[in-house]
Image (spheres, rainbow, N blue to C red):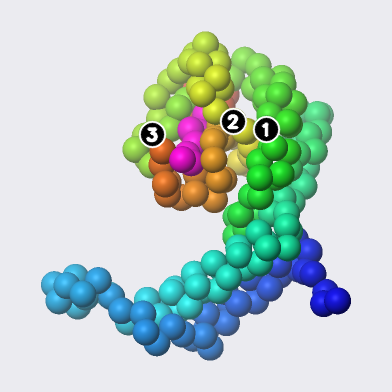
Amino acid sequence: MSKVYNTQELIQILADERRACLLGQRLNLAAKASGSPLIDKYLRSDGIRKFTAYQDFKAAVHRYQREHRVSGIVWRQLTLKGKTLHYPEVDTQLIALVSDLETLKAVKASILAFWYEVTAGMELYLSFNNGKDHQLITPADVDRIIQRTEWASVCKWENSNFLEIILQLGWGQPAEAAYKRKWSASGSEYIHAVNPGNRPIC
């Protein structure tokens, strides 16, 4: 019986392959630019070949995940204001299996409870226009978004005098949601919490 690679091994394999593609050690020679002479003169064919080679390899890894039922979940830990959250998240280079999506849905309430606790007294902003703009919203607005979503993820950005806590509320495949692919089947909204008087910077 052949060995089945686990989640961490697949992440490392993809990282190694990505590095090889970026260095030009792997190219998809059949990859072509858009086909439009106007656009193609601005595109580098070697970049397209490197990018396509990695995307092809990644698609093969995703097929492997499905075939061998290898989870895309990694466990993270976040500590804020003396409180610690252990939560699952799908690695950005892997896909979520159906069982992974069920795990994400099952922990949504605990992630939200943590987020509400550590953002008490902070101002909330909804990002739009691909994160370029932010609109001040209320906790009631956040509650309405929560009702429309399946899973949640949280991260922070901070330095000595600034803290931003970002809540991602999503549905469908996390990788597709993050990159705005297949919007109707997958997607997400981002809520940014900052101290009063500050604006989101992420």
Question: Horizontally, is 159 left or right of 181 in the view?
Answer: right
Camera-side residue: 51 or 155?
A: 51
Amino acid residing under circle 3: Phe
Q: Is residue 8 above or below residue 32?
A: above
Residue plotted at (78% across, 64% down): 6
Camera-side residue: 145 or 86?
A: 145
Label 2: state its secondary structure. loop
Amino acid residing under circle 2: Glu
Residue plotted at (49% across, 36% down): 188
Q: Name the residue beneath numbered marker 1.
A: 105
**Which is nearer the N-term, disc 1 or disc 3?**
1
What's the distance in space between the residues labelled 1 and 3, CA to CA?
A: 24 Å
What's the distance in space between the residues labelled 3 and 2, CA to CA?
A: 19 Å
Residue 125 is situated, as x and y percent measured from the top left of the image, at: 47, 25
Instruction: Please report the bounds of the magenta region as a residue range.
Output: 185-191
Question: Horizontally, is 2 left or right of 57 in the view?
Answer: right
Q: Name the residue beneath numbered marker 2.
A: 150
Camera-side residue: 149 or 25?
A: 149
Q: Is residue 200 above or below residue 122?
A: below
Residue plotted at (68% across, 29% down): 108
Q: Is residue 188 magenta?
A: yes
Q: Name the residue beneath numbered marker 3.
A: 128
Badge 2 vs badge 1, beta-carbon distance below 8 Å: yes
